[in-house]
Image (cartoon, rainbow, N blue to C red):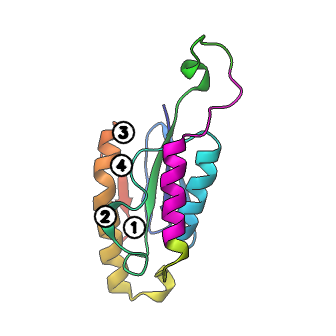
Amino acid sequence: MDLQVLRDSHTRAVVPDSSCFLCDGSALLVLLAARDLIHAGWRLLHHPLYGNYRPHQQPYRSVLLARRDAAADSPRGGDVQRTPTDSESLHLIEAALGFFSNSRILTPDMAATSLLKDCAALDFALMRLPLQQAGLPDCLVPTA
């Protein structure tokens, strides 16, 4: 299974057998990038609004996605050009984007350094369980 971690640029990640895309900007950009991957056949491995923090409370957002081999998903095991869009993931990410679109968003450049450090630590802690459930060791390293 391929894994993709979308993160704000507040951390660096060392994720074996996966890739990490750092979004240089707001949490909204992370969600938009996740939506693009979902349309390309990836699926969410956790709720995009994890932690129950509102957009004006938490400037950082991370999303973990997975993509299975499309041929392995085929009932005949044949060649399949593209993995279909996961409807549940698409529904969740669209709902999250709708929520963000109608909210005031705290971006990293708007917050005090001390708040950013706390928010980065919180995002780091909230991502541990989804990464462990995906079979990854502790692999995220906050940049402080």
Foreground residue among 15 and 107: 107
Q: Nearer the viewer, mark 2 or mark 1?
A: 2
Image quarter where the C terminus lies is bottom left
Badge 3 crowding class, 10 Å Cα cut-off, few under 14, some 14 to 19, many 20 or more, is: some
Does 101 sit above or below residue 51?
Answer: below
x, y (%) of residue 53?
34, 71
Badge 4 crowding class, 10 Å Cα cut-off, few under 14, some 14 to 19, many 20 or more, is: some
Q: CA distance from mark 3 to mark 2?
A: 18 Å
Query: What residue type is disc 1 on?
Result: Thr
SS of the residue under disc 1: loop
Q: Count of labels shown? A: 4
- Earlier-in-chain disc, 2 versus 1: 2
Q: Nearer the viewer, mark 3 or mark 2?
A: 2
Residue drawn at the location 35% of the way across and 49% of the way down: 139
SS of the residue under disc 2: helix
Q: Would residue 24 be found to the left or right of residue 144 on screen?
A: right
Label 2, on which residue?
51
Label 1, on which residue?
143
Q: Which mark is residue 134?
A: 3
